[in-house]
Image: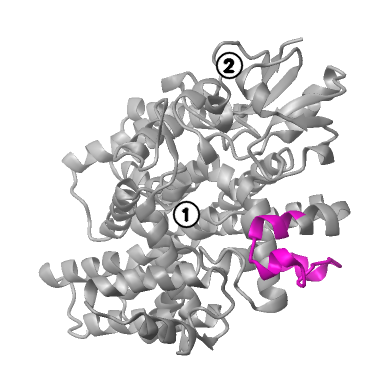
Amino acid sequence: MRIFFVTLLLLIFACLSISSMMQKSGTCDEIAYHIVAGYSYFKTFDFRLNPSNPPLPRYIMAFPLNFMDLKASFNDINWQKADSAKFSRKFFFQDNRDKFRTILFLSRLMVVFCGIFAGFLVYRTASRFYGEKSGLFSLFLFCFTPEIIAHSSLATLDMVFACFTLLAIFSFWRFSTTPALTNILFASVSLGLAQLSKGSALLLYPAFLFLIFIKYIKKQTADKYLFLKTILIFIFSVIVIWAGYGFNVKSFLAQTVNQEEKINFAQKTISKFIPGWDRQKTEHLLKDVKLPLTTYVTTILGVAEHTKEGHNTFIWGKWSQYGSRWYYVVAFLIKTPIPMLILFGFALFSLCRKSLTENELYIVVPAVLIFAAASFSKLQIGIRYILPVYLLICIFISRVRTFKLGFIKRGIIFLLGVWIVTISLFSWSNYLSYFNEFIGGPDNGWRYLRDSNLDWGQDLPALAKYVRKNKINELTFFYFGEDDPSLYGINFKNITAEEIEKPRKAIYAISAQFLDSVNWSRLYKPTTKAGFSIFIYDLR
């Protein structure tokens, strides 16, 4: 029966993910940065296209494209300039226009498989920590959480990152309890795969060191070489990272553009630590010295620079270049289903009855570290950045099943479960733009958060449906996205600068991300919305 329920829940999860992804257009990052970049990695083993993140998720989502007859213009000027967005749009909408939907479907399907594997890991981890029934309960929460379904349905980095982060945590827990050779190797590979998924996975290194330190402090291990074995895992994980880049050995600036900009940045950084450092030495170091892992190091430095500079962030009705320490607290409270928040509250309250176990530290420490690092980062453009925390919370909540519960408490948990299922089913296909009842649901989400929390260019099919239903020949569009509206039968023209200031008698479709850029958008009530991310104004 256990296998039956696990299989059933994962099948339901797969059905929700696949059916909802078929209702959505390509999102910004899928089109501009990930799918085509992954395809180019396979075909050229050149990582010039958008090297801002490690390659594993792109390998995964682009894998089935190797079995398709696709055209790619690797002699194109945009390839030479490493302009990922322009090169990708040409790949999709000129070279392979007739195959676009197949490419998008197959790429997304690979991430669904990662989501299924992540769900199994949630079940497996919770079962080992709390028992089989708790494992099933954790899997149930995983399968019906809108934010998890949303990012399992898109060919982006976040679910792959969450999946391999949990795999690394689980395998390191196995190693720390039984530090045998097989567990050392498994932990090394898992940790390396997590690092190849996203730069944020670097946080696992200090998290794991802290957990080993706690074991020594509390005298929970008799293995006096445990620390050295942990360092060995770290070293092996770096070899796995190098393997992900094909064991290439090259200079830092090989296969890169904007070299002067990178040299200036490196010179400025090095000079802070070594006064009087000569620029000629910097050029020699970056251009002539060949080393392993240069692409990965450049990627991590680029992420660090972006994190430091910040990104235009919308929270609680205001835009900011540097975000807010409360961004992810707010996002978590309004984008997580209320019944799940209640269950999480129960789990936290249960700590009064039973303190954290040694096993639970492997859930709590990484979750707190990931959440804290995201909160202090200036790069805050979506709750997806803390997606691994959702998986860990699904596991942690199941601790409530370890207590002896009376009829009333069991009934409350059952009703909360029914509530979660109801939310998931009623949110079908609009999981990305889900907001809970605290703010009045997804209709009001645009007032509090934007970008990938709400609008990632995914609602072109909904707009196309509105156009067909109302027999609209042409509309004026201000679109936040990289997909091509004409592929969905939408005849449109782009909004002009004059129309941003003052509208004419026409039908306007404006992406939620751009609402504040249109001076008159707050003066008129939208006629309707396409999905929850495109506002339609019929001003005829």
**What span is in magenta?**
62-89
In the figure, 241 relative to 481: above or below?
below
Viewer-proximal residue among 391 and 399? 391
Q: Amino acid at mark 2?
A: Trp
Residue 234 x, y percent position in the rendering: 35, 79
In the rendered image, is residue 177 in sight? no
Q: For the C terminus, give its image quadrant.
A: top right
Q: Do callouts 1 and 2 mark residues in contact (Cβ within 8 Å)?
A: no
Viewer-proximal residue among 286 and 160? 286
> Which class describes the residues within 10 Å of circle 2: few (<14), some (14-19), or many (20+)?
some
Q: Nearer the viewer, mark 1 or mark 2?
A: 2
Residue 9 x, y percent position in the rendering: 58, 46
Q: Is residue 524 left or right of residue 475?
A: left
* Residue 520: mark: 2
> Which residue has dot 1 on it?
123
In the figure, 10 relative to 190: above or below?
above
Residue 18 x, y percent position in the rendering: 70, 46
